[in-house]
Image (cartoon, rainbow, N blue to C red):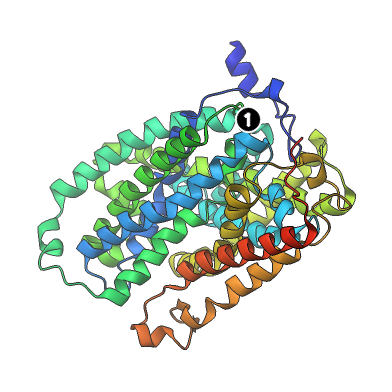
Amino acid sequence: MTESVRAAATIEARSIDPVPEAERHGRPRSLFTLWFAANMQVTAAVTGALTLLSGLHPVWGLVAIALGNVLGGVPMALHAAQGPKLGVPQMIQSRAQFGVYGAVLPLVLVVIMYLGFFASGNVLGGQAISGISGLPIDVSIVLYAVLSGVFAVIGYRLIHRFGWVASALSVVVFVYLSIRLITTQDLGAVLAAPRLDFPKFLLALSLTASWQLTFGPYVADTSRYLPSATSVRATFWWTYGGTVLGAVWAMSFGALAYAVAGNAFKGKEVAYLVGLGHAGLVVPLLLSIALGKFTVNVLNIYGGYMSVATTFTAFTRRAALSPAVRIGYVAAIAVLGAVIAILGRGEFLKNFVLFLEFLLYFLTPWSAINLIDFYAVRKERYDLAAIYDPDGIYGRWGISALMAYAVGVLVQIPFANVPGVFTGFLAPLLGGADIAWLLGLTVPAALYLVFSRRQATRSGVSSVQRT
């Protein structure tokens, strides 16, 4: 066993505690393959199909996919640049804005997000495992969850190493499937005579942007071991390139597949993808789908356990976690995620779109506040020790952030549109278009910036120290 392989298979020592400079390693280009692999998978293809469910023409669905990912990828990649500068996971850094106790609010929502995405990943991964092994689908879901948990326990190095392998595999598989889709289906017929329905276009745009925006809580987790001298520009562009390219490709494939296949794709995504290939490639394609989904499934449970740990340690003041505690957190999330997957797999596509829309309204205000604090208020300067101390300079409750967050959620309600669940009273005036996420980004960012500057003016002291 080589030294690099041995290092990748060693259980990660760090959890929510800062990574010392002596333990920093790697180059930002590894973020490209990791986030490319996290996006080039079957759930992204499902999300692409969702853009057409409302009746949007496929051509404009493809435009919405490209534009939504280009826009949503900006804040996502800006979060990635926080990792090398601070050396801590993404969500624990939120204590600097919301307070050590106040950060529990966005943390709970993020934990729900991780569980939801982990459960949905288990459904699709379980379908692939079942097709390969012949095992019952529920047994396959449990097996997929367990394997994801093992990788999450080992941690950062193995996740990055597997991301490289999965990225290469995804390119091969999606090139092959894309060629099969183009050469075996009549795409010209479904792409002819494009008609723009602007409200439906905006709804599709919000859906694809939400895909990227919900990655915000993940990204610093995967960049925090990079040397602190790593430039913000390099971290941003390697992450942005991987996540946007992977998502646009996979979502466009899913949209076109749904456009030509309709119900043959909806609800039977894995079977349809495998059916595109030659009969002799069924098992290799099922295996590639399972492995392609595996990267982001591991990221979900990895980020989930650190978010749960961050929540509980707010009250215990602990920073480091023992391997036993780490395994316990991961195991709890794996079990819960598998149970949710088994109970909810029957209405997977419907439940997933509702879940994405729900997250968008609650996570965009958090993302806006976190980014404006890092780049405009404290300008990358933080007291890391105080992040773990309720009596430190960040305090127990960050009133400015909590107020801005509350307004950021409330201002979206009149414009919200989750078909079949909730429609804000102003959404019909826009033809059903969903622009709530734009307000969720801009309003809380502006409010937090104003609140922070007023507070600094009143105190006459800046609280942007960094250890």
| Local SS, label 1 | loop
Q: In this view, does 412 lie above or below 188?
A: below
Q: Which quadrant of the view contains residue 111?
A: bottom right
Q: Is residue 402 above or below residue 184?
A: below
Please name the residue shown 63% across and 42% down the image. Answer: 380
Tell me, yes or no, if residue 35 can be seen here.
Answer: yes
Please name the residue shown 20% across and 62% down the image. Answer: 59
**How many discs appear?**
1
Q: Which is more toward the observer, 246 or 348?
A: 246
Q: In the image, is 246 to the left or to the right of 21?
A: left
Give percent across and percent down for residue 373: 63, 53
Please name the residue shown 35% across and 67% down the image. Answer: 204
Give percent across and percent down for residue 128: 44, 47
Give percent across and percent down for residue 6: 63, 17
Q: In this view, does 409 lie above or below 154?
A: below
Q: In this view, does 10 lie above or below 92?
A: above
Q: Which amino acid does label 1 sit on?
A: Tyr
Tell me, yes or no, if residue 151 can be seen here.
Answer: no
- Residue, disc 1: 225
